[in-house]
Image (spheres, rainbow, N blue to C red):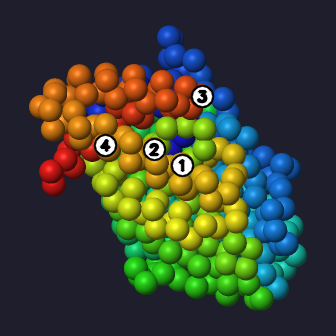
Amino acid sequence: MTDEPMYDAMSDPTSDPTSEPMDAPGHAEMPDPAVQPSGAQEIAPGLLVIPNQRVGLVPNIGVIGGTRAVLVVETGLGTANAERLLAFALEVAKGRRLYLTTTHFHPEHAFGAHVFAGRATYLVNRAQADDLAAKGPGYLDMFRGLGGPVARHLDGVPVPAPDVVYDDAGYDLDLGGRTVRLRPTGRGHTRGDQVVEVPDAEVLFTGDLAETGQFAIFPWFPPYDTDVSGVRWLSVMDRLAARRPRVVVPGHGDLGGPGVLAAVADYLRELRDETWRRRDAAMGPDAIVAEVRALLTERHPEWTGQEWIERGVGCLCAEHGA
């Protein structure tokens, strides 16, 4: 998902997401979601991050090197982005073996994996692989319905197919002198979230479990997608925050330290508490949304993505008393 406002159909899941593309009259076309490998920053020896520079539908991307192999984290949206990323990764690898992983199945994170076929081994956790198979086609159609540059990036793109699928115990990937830990977190932002830990550098890639400078992204679109869980997401963030990594690479937004994780946990907790307090008082859904949105935007006036507050309230209302 993105730190920019999403397509109107995502706020009204009963509508056809392909019926009115973003570049139709009355819509402003989104900026080109282009990955820029030239902006790569070395945040630890042999560990590069390509920042998203706060461009919508561009994730923060990692390129992690060991003596024998290199791991790429995320692909960017579509073929052209993945081609630029692959060329960059091959230049960094200089003949070392190449691996690819993604933090979750959403298109800007994973829908360039086909470009790496035959050049890298693509490995993900079981729940993410299940998400790709079950939800990938629908999300591909929905994102193509955004029109403009998003649709162009996804032209001819297939649903990703991992080469290696690991179980819930996690996967330790030996890159040579550096082991990277791939760890499923359980249901949170999606059913199949995975974090990527680089212990020797104390770096954690979170995917969209954490963002900076924006309200948490809740892909709550009943009846089509209801796998996001505010309650379980909060539990995940508390566990991650307790590890206190030196550097946190969020799905979107600026890199930071352990405070990034604590801030997301604090927000999810206040969203839950404010929603449930009003639910306990038998307020109606519209009134809860109005009050909670007004309160949280007043508390966090600098954050973007206010449209996700309503989605989060809807999710937590559904989890109230469960």
Badge 1 element: helix
Give the distance between the C-alpha atoms of the residues marked 3 and 2, in whole angstroms: 14 Å
Give the distance between the C-alpha atoms of the residues marked 2 and 4, in whole angstroms: 10 Å
Precedes in sequence: disc 4 or disc 3: 4
Proximity of marks 2 and 1: CB atoms separated by less than 8 Å: yes
The amino acid type of the residue labelled 4 equals: Asp
Give the distance between the C-alpha atoms of the residues marked 1 and 3, in whole angstroms: 14 Å
Is residue 139 visible from the viewing direction of this image?
Answer: no
Proximity of marks 4 and 3: CB atoms separated by less than 8 Å: no
Q: Which residue is mark 1?
A: 263
Q: x and y percent of residue 121 in the render?
A: 62, 77
Q: Which mark is residue 267?
A: 2
Q: Which residue is mark 4?
A: 273
* For residue 76, side relative to residue 144 (left or right): right
Number of residues whose C-alpha sits closer than 10 Å to that of mark 3, classed few (under 14), some (14–19) or many (20 or more): few
Proximity of marks 3 and 2: CB atoms separated by less than 8 Å: no
The amino acid type of the residue labelled 3 equals: Glu
Q: Which residue is mark 3?
A: 302
Q: x and y percent of residue 142 in the render?
A: 42, 39
The residue lying toward the viewer, choosing from 157 and 277, is: 277
Q: Quadrant of residue 293?
A: top left
